[in-house]
Image (spheres, rainbow, N blue to C red):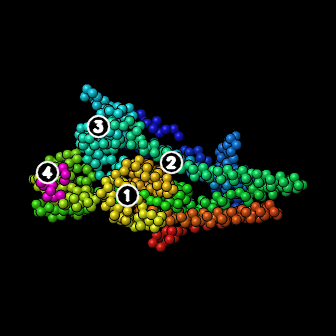
Amino acid sequence: MSSILGQRPAPAPVGPRPAPQKRRTQMPALPEARWAVSSLALFLAALPLYLLDAPVWVWGTLLAATYITGGWEPGWEGLKALKDKTLDVDLLMVVAALGAAAIGQVLDGALLIVIFAASGALEAVATARTADSVRGLLDLAPSTATRLLADGTEDTAATEALAVGDVILVRPGERIGADGRVLVGAGDVDQATITGEPLPVAKQTGDEVFAGTVNGTGALRVRVERDPSDSVIARIVQMVEQASETKAPTQLFIERIEQRYSIGMVIATLAVFAIPLAFGDGLQSALLRAMTFMIVASPCAVVLSTMPPLLSAIANAGRRGVLAKSAVVMERLGRIDTVALDKTGTLTEGTPQVTDLRPLPAGGLDEDALLALTASAEHPSEHPLARAVVAAARGRGLRLSDAGDFTSTPGEGITATVDGRTITVGAPARLLDGAAQQVHLAVVAELEEAGRTAVLVLRDKVPVGVLGVADRLRPDAAATVAALTSLTGRTPVLLTGDNERAARNLASEVGITELRAGLLPQDKAAAVKEWEARGRRVLVVGDGVNDAPALAAAHSGIAMGKAGSDLALETADAVVVRDELAAIPAVIGLSRKARRLVVQNLAIAGTFITVLVAWDLIGTLPLPLGVAGHEGSTVIVGLNGLRLLREAAWPRLAKDNV
């Protein structure tokens, strides 16, 4: 894959930039998908005709087309691999299918073709979607920035052309074009894409800002401190690419097994044909024995040993709102032994809520009056805190007054006139002088110790109340943590970009004892790699762009679907569509059930193949009996795997010991 960083879009013209369009890979456009779908459709059209004894030329033509559409590409690739002295299982399957057709088992060979065509298509689709989603991350960073020149004039420059030391102007509502530090100005910056923090962060002179984050209010002059290719956003792209590639060793192991099996089966088939022939057996008899061997040794049952249980588990999980992206994902989920949970948007709902109302004696207000007064003043504001206050007032059915003379000061708060009184709402540290701060410090400190964001309300410069705002915990968070602890034998770890005080408060509520706070995306990924270097299989659960590197680096990754970013949803191995945390331990339990069925099926398939092959080599296995045994084992393992489609197969963690 070529470097994604070298594929930046051309600079956009000056003016408002259209919102990035969600990229979606068109699945039918992939050649592998087209051929697989065509092969399956032809096979399904031929099957009823074959079973109803229609004229041979009708179903025979359809099955021949199945062989061609599904088998030509793996066959051609296999022939090219032979030039490198490599024999892969795809070519072996094509040869086995043709061998089955040669002795009249046309339908059996067609089934092999369809299975392997579908497998190749799924792999191609997954690869294409991952690459497409990583490229889409670059839409987070603006393509142009306003650069301030030495003479004080402005210049529109491509962000990729910015250099360390350049100064850029970021107006309200614009995305910041580069990683840097604020030289002049103050503003509230939404940096949830980088740190996952639920609320905008007040930035002023000397504070660090990141490319791709959004400046809410106030103009900022930012000195560029990192080359665009080394920005946090760029490093997220690189880490996702690199971590995705590190999952290859499992695939390499499978390919080594396939190579050995392929070589062994070809040698054995030739020996079964040649040795009896050398000892005087007839040509037709030797060929029949060899073709029978190829059929009974064909790994149809082995292939179906794995897919029906895993695909049934995928279907069952899908009905429950968990989308696993492939059978490999479903299998891997059952192997995890460590869980790392994001905070905002994962354990919490990701939306600020008013949690506390603390009227102060000087104001003479009750809780409803304090909330109504604050909401009236905040109503014109678009700040997330303001929306939370207004939503709380409406939830209580309170009447709001009109606000006049509204002003917003970045990093401090808002001021408005309500019913002839001047109302100021903002951060206590910015609004109180030394003496007043000492008086009200206890209330503020109590809220902040509880992990709340404290909001002070002044009426005519007199403090009248304090509001506590926090991200609301999901109702099933504590039960999920307990279930994950039971499944893995380890308490989950909390990884968050939020401050340590808020993180510790939430961790204590849900029963988490280990946490890492204040993390950037690369820090989360580094923590995951550290655990995996110790031999752990880590499951990461997150929802934002800032979680994507950790999701990609982990053994398995699950994204929360409703509020999840496009990149997190594409990078993760599975998605919880309904945002039900309890579905995570349930799908892990389902995966473990599927893995147990896979082992059962492999034992059944291996037993059938061993018995039938031994019979064919030692005695004389009648071809119809060989086909019946081969097909019978395939049906048995298929039906065994389909048991996971039942509603009862979905684990109920209070009862199932998974």
Q: Amino acid at mark 2?
A: Ser
- Crowding at label 3, few (<14), some or many (≥20) Cα neighbours within 10 Å? many
Q: Note whether 60 is above or below 490 in the view shown.
A: above
Label 4 SS: loop
* Relative to 460, 581 lies left or right: right
Instruction: Name the residue at 47% across, 51% down.
Output: 529
Q: Which mark is residue 515?
A: 1
Mark 2 or mark 1: whose residue is earlier in sequence: 2
Instruction: Report the magenta residues as a range.
Output: 428-441
Kindly indicate whether the residue at mark 4 contacts the one at mark 3 (C-beta within 8 angstroms).
no
- Work out how far the residue at label 4 is from the one at label 2, CA to CA, in angstroms: 52 Å
Instruction: Name the residue at 36% across, 32% down.
Output: 163
In the rendered image, residue 262 lying in the magenta stretch gets the answer no
- Work out how far the residue at label 2 is from the one at label 3, CA to CA, in angstroms: 34 Å
- Work out how far the residue at label 4 is from the one at label 1, CA to CA, in angstroms: 35 Å
Residue under numbered circle 2: 244
The answer to whether residue 346 is visible is no
Q: Nearer the viewer, residue 369 or 82?
A: 82
Q: Amino acid at mark 1?
A: Leu
The answer to whether residue 609 is visible is yes
In the rendered image, residue 437 lying in the magenta stretch gets the answer yes
Q: Amino acid at mark 4?
A: Asp
Q: Quadrant of residue 282?
A: bottom right
- Work out how far the residue at label 2 is from the one at label 1, CA to CA, in angstroms: 25 Å
